[in-house]
Image (cartoon, rainbow, N blue to C red):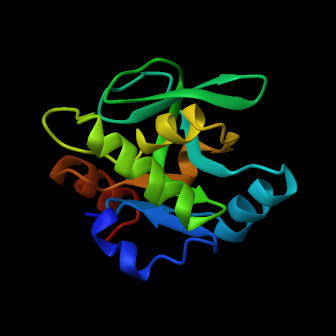
């Protein structure tokens, strides 16, 4: 569905993609600026998931760079929040097309996070920006939403 919006993506401008099932209590500009300061081609907002719950996707690092992401499989404790940054829209568009050509699906669906694997294969430098778990609120399931509402007395 993100790739469907490709006609609105400026291939030479930064692109941030946010799943609609999370709330984050951070200044999102810090996430974006960190990527530019580090000279990255893209960055993934993450948190430490000590439980390694397979409802998330996960990023594996080597020397502070992402070497692999996995959807719905805990390969590290760096779980992705669902907010993704590319310093140029074309990195996302080209990598997403490659993923679709390879028919790289999880549970018979295409996900956004695995696009980074194709960017990495093309030489992109991808990092993470880790936030405290208390700053991330998943609301993608009825149970998660009820927890969020209870914590925030809504």
State the image quarter where residue 146 is shown: bottom left
- Looking at the image, residue 72 lies above or below residue 3: above
Give the position of the C terminus as an image quadrant: bottom left
Q: Is residue 27 visible?
A: no
41 to the left or right of 63? left
Q: Residue 41, percent across and down?
A: 69, 51
- Looking at the image, residue 5 lies above or below residue 50: below
Nearest the eye: 63 or 145: 63
State the image quarter where residue 152 is shown: bottom left
Nearest the eye: 49 or 70: 70
Query: Residue placed at 43% from the left, 44% from the top?
Result: 115
142 to the left or right of 33? left
Query: Residue placed at 56% from the left, 54% from the top?
Result: 135
- Looking at the image, residue 133 lies above or below residue 137: above
Q: Residue 60, percent across and down?
A: 57, 24
Give the position of the N terminus as an image quadrant: bottom left
**Residue occupying the far bottom of the picture:** 8
Query: Residue placed at 62% from the left, 64% from the top?
Result: 88
Q: Is residue 57 visible?
A: yes
Q: Residue 26, percent across and down?
A: 63, 64
State the image quarter where residue 31 is shown: bottom right
47 to the left or right of 142? right
Q: Residue 86, percent across and down?
A: 60, 58
Query: Residue placed at 49% from the left, 56% from the top?
Result: 92
């Amino acid at each position: 569905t993100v790739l469907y919006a490709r006609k609105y993506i400026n291939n030479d401008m930064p692109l941030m993609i946010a799943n609609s099932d999370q709330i984050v209590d951070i200044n999102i500009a810090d996430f974006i600026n960190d990527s530019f300061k580090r000279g990255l081609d893209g960055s993934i907002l993450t948190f430490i998931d000590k439980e390694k719950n397979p409802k998330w996707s996960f990023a594996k690092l080597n020397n502070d760079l992402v070497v692999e992401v996995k959807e719905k499989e805990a390969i590290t404790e760096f779980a992705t929040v669902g907010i993704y940054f590319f310093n140029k829209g074309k990195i996302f568009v080209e990598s997403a097309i490659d993923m679709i050509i390879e028919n790289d699906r999880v549970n018979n669906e295409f996900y956004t996070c695995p696009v980074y694997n194709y960017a990495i294969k093309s030489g992109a430098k991808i990092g993470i920006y880790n936030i405290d778990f208390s700053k991330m609120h998943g609301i993608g399931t009825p149970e998660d939403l009820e927890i969020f509402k209870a914590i925030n007395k809504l």
